[in-house]
Amino acid sequence: MLEIKNLYAGYGGADIIKNINLEANRGEILCIAGPNGCGKSTLLKTIARLLPYRGSITVDGQDAASFTRRDLSKKIALLGQISQIYFPYTVYDTISLGRYVHTSGFLKNLSAEDRNIIANTIKRLELEDVQNQLITELSGGQLQRVFLARTLVQDPEIILLDEPTNHLDLKHQIELLQYLSVWVKEKNRIIVGVLHDLNLVHRFSDYTALIRDGEIVSRGKPEEVLSGAILREVYGMDIGGFMRESLERWGKM
């Protein structure tokens, strides 16, 4: 279980997220939604202990602040919006880096189990054809899948995803979220994901938290949180009406 209580964090002494209280249980996907600049990415970085904070974050009852950085990496993995390319590694080697926290050394010390986990993940994310290419040669969508694969082979208890469908076409967006839905249930893990597309939030989240100006304004089942009145208040437009109008247009085609 991931439990967050009275969480405050930000930059330069100013709080971006304020009094956040959330829970996520094993086998669940918790989606965070809200307009640009409301604090969604800041929340994920704080859970990953990349920012100083006030309040508490516990994983299975243990204070996250008590973990060493290496042990925390076995518990929590973060895939941010933009992954910087520092070295022109191959796709395979880049994904293999996710196993580093489980090994005693670098890539040459990968076990047969490590290589099996890597190979299965590469296959599931349809990266077999490019696994020997340099990541500097990939498209944005391919690169996004590579960094997600690296996160998955890390095999953490909790995965934090900041816009995981960024750069992906519609087919790969759906396939990716379907895969993650199966992964979280089969592995009995937790995913906390930031998504802008409310259709995807409604379709794939078990629980949803809606944030505005750094504070949670609604949380619960997606069908409860994504109601017309709440969305109109948070986004300043009739999103439900827009969705229904779009659906009607699709129905006429």
Image: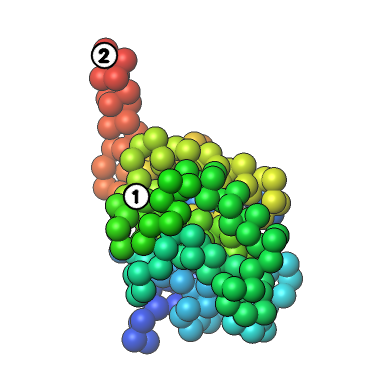
Between discs 2 and 1, the one toward the N terminus: 1
Q: Amino acid at mark 2?
A: Met
* Residue count near mark 1 (Cα–Cα under 10 Å), binned few <14, some 14–19, many ≥20: some
Image quadrant where one finds the C terminus: top left
Q: Residue at x 34, y 33 (%)?
A: 240
Q: Farthest residue toward the right? A: 61
Q: Amino acid at mark 1?
A: Gly
- Residue beneath label 2, please? 253
Q: Residue at x 41, y 40 (%)?
A: 172
Q: Residue at x 34, y 86 (%)?
A: 12
Q: For the residue labelled by badge 1, is the local secondary structure a helix, a strand or a loop? A: helix
Q: Farthest residue toward the bottom? A: 13
Q: Position of residue 21 (x, y in %)?
A: 56, 65
Q: Residue at x 39, y 35 (%)?
A: 171
Q: CA distance from mark 2 to mark 1?
A: 29 Å
Up/down of 242 relative to 185, above or below: above
Q: Nearer the viewer, residue 25 or 94?
A: 94
* Residue count near mark 2 (Cα–Cα under 10 Å), binned few <14, some 14–19, many ≥20: few
Give left or right: position of 45 versus 187. left
**Is residue 242 visible from the viewing direction of this image?**
yes
Q: Position of residue 173 (x, y in %)?
A: 41, 41
Q: Nearer the viewer, residue 152 or 117?
A: 117
Q: Position of residue 190 (x, y in %)?
A: 62, 56
Give left or right: position of 156 versus 192. right
- The circle on residue 141 is 1
Q: Nearer the viewer, residue 118 or 232?
A: 118
Image quadrant where one finds the N terminus: bottom right
